[in-house]
Image (cartoon, rainbow, N blue to C red):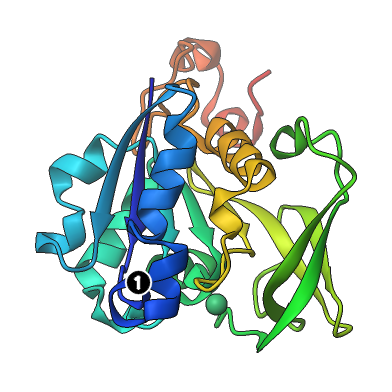
Amino acid sequence: MINVTIWNEYIHEKESEKVAQVYPNGIHGAIAEMLGKSGEYNIRTATLDMEECGLTDEVLNSTDVLIWWGHMKHSDVPDEIAEKVRQRVLAGMGFIPLHSAHLSKPFVKLMGTLCRSKWRENDEKERIWVIEPSHPICKNLPEYIELPMEETYGERFEIPAPDELIFISWFSGGEVFRSGCCYKRGLGKVFYFRPGHEEYPTFYRDDITQILKNAIEWAKPSEGPVPTLGHFEALENVKDKFEGQDESLKKHTYIK
Ligand code: ZN
């Protein structure tokens, strides 16, 4: 089973009546509930108010894929925790930052750019176009998904060019946004997914859950070989090839 940890700053849901009505168990609770229906995952949740943000070494080291929602309190996540997340991604953990987590410390660190964008809260429609139908994260999706109301994000989105851009969103106010961005960082995979403003029930949708499930499957650690790093002895007996040759030949001869 894939070990999925869902991290949420969990502030809006406690401070806003409106948000609490949409997500009575928190955004992390809603995502856990939807993903949990299939019984395919070991799901844990972690929040900002927990010790070490709920991301102890034990939790991080046993997480295959980390989902992250944050907005108001990115700066309250200690640099040390953000760095641990980055290191875990480089070592192979999958990372799925959602919506306003484009400004979360771990994502910004992994991207190396500012990651800002335009935004507007105006109850506009979002149409998410699937532009790479053969990508694993697009499995079982229709050509586009419409969210009747979402927060509007607009380009420019200050990210490095994604390794694979799989979704583009259009909003009824006219903006467009790169809303599904895939990156490899070290041995890990990162999928930024745009929707999920706290005032809309986006995370209760089956199509959004399907995307998260596909993304978990894509981002989970690979089963490839563990690379050897640092100084390493030659696999072939290189020295014998030069036996009997004079010094000048040794210097200029490539070994075939
Ligand atoms: Zn938002």
Q: Where does ligand 1 appear, by image quarter?
A: bottom right
Residue 114, how many percent across, how many down? 55, 83
Q: Is residue 245 left or right of residue 22?
A: right
| Residue depicted at 28% across the width and 74% down the height | 14
Mark 1 near ligand 1 (CB under 8 Å)? no
Residue 254, how many percent across, how many down? 66, 28
Using the rendered view, name the quadrant where residue 20 is placed.
bottom left
**Pick the front one: 216 or 35:** 35
Q: Amino acid at mark 1?
A: Glu
Q: Is residue 27 left or right of residue 63?
A: right
The answer, for residue 101, to whether it is visible in the render is yes
Residue extending farthest left: 51
**Pick the front one: 164 or 251:** 164
The answer, for residue 92, to whether it is visible in the render is no
* Up-down relation of residue 228 to residue 215 (above or below): above
Q: Is residue 58 left or right of residue 164?
A: left
Q: Quadrant of the C terminus?
A: top right
* Up-down relation of residue 26 to residue 134 (above or below): below
Label 1, on which residue? 13
* Up-down relation of residue 69 to residue 250 (above or below): below
* Up-down relation of residue 20 to residue 158 (above or below): above
**Pick the front one: 157 or 89:** 157
At mark 1, the secondary structure is: helix
**Pick the front one: 163 or 203:** 203
| Residue depicted at 76% across the width and 38% down the height | 138
* Neighbours of disc 1 within 10 Å: few (<14), some (14-19), many (20+): many
| Residue depicted at 88% across the width and 50% down the height | 131
